[in-house]
Image (cartoon, rainbow, N blue to C red):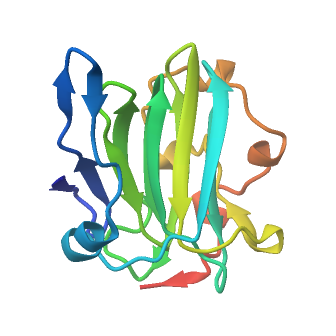
Amino acid sequence: MNVIKTEIEGVVILEPRVFTDSRGYFFESYNKKVFDAEVCPVDFVQDNESCSTKGVMRGLHFQRPPHAQAKLVRCVEGAVLDLAVDIRKGSPTYGRHVACLLTEDNHRQFFIPRGFAHGFAVLSDRAVFQYKCDNYYAPQADGGISILDPSLDIDWQTDPAQAILSEKDTKHPLLKDFESPFEL
């Protein structure tokens, strides 16, 4: 596995070694020993999957402590632009983001530590998105910041005016109006 560091410490892109032949391809998508040694020790406890159509934007979500989650995400069908926004008070990269194109062809995975808001935009006609979480979902701990916040300066590679958003995602505060529950 090739671990690619990003501009924000702890947020990494993972490229697996893919073996192809006349039958198709094979790769190891997760190995705890390798992940713990190359990225950081994490105990994933829950796997999730979503299916969305082109123009869907989800996020920017997080769970408040003590239910915070780190996530390892990948797109198994289609293409998404995936994003992590640093929402840790006191962080030198607070409010900055890392974007990663995840596709069924590049097999990349994106690791988002605790203390980051997460979201994605579907770029293909359909996308199946999977993610591992290191804490169980707790609805009472749901949090978010606006996926359309202009101060974040995100190029979603899709027209936000035409985006398909959940009602919940239209109600998240802008970053400037947000009180982060995370400390660096």
Q: Residue at x 28, y 75 (%)?
A: 36
Choose between 3 and 169: the one closer to the eye: 3
Choose between 152 and 4: the one closer to the eye: 4
In the rendered picture of this protein, how many numbered marks are placed on residues? Answer: 0
With 2 as the anchor, is 138 left or right in this view?
right
Q: Which quadrant: the C terminus?
A: bottom left
Q: Is residue 31 visible?
A: yes
In the depicted structure, whether residue 11 falls above or below residue 23: below
Q: Quadrant of residue 90?
A: bottom left
With 22 as the anchor, is 71 left or right in this view?
right
Q: Position of residue 59 (x, y in %)?
A: 63, 47
Q: Position of residue 177 (x, y in %)?
A: 67, 65
Q: Quadrant of residue 24?
A: top left
Q: Is residue 96 visible?
A: no
In the depicted structure, whether residue 164 falls above or below residue 171: above
Q: Quadrant of residue 3?
A: bottom left
In the depicted structure, whether residue 49 falls above or below residue 162: below
Q: Residue at x 34, y 70 (%)?
A: 32
Q: Position of residue 171 (x, y in %)?
A: 80, 49
In the orientation shown, which residue stands out farthest toward the front? 23
Q: Residue at x 73, y 54 (%)?
A: 172
With 137 as the anchor, is 40 left or right in this view?
left
Q: Residue at x 46, y 50 (%)?
A: 73
Q: Position of residue 10 (x, y in %)?
A: 30, 69
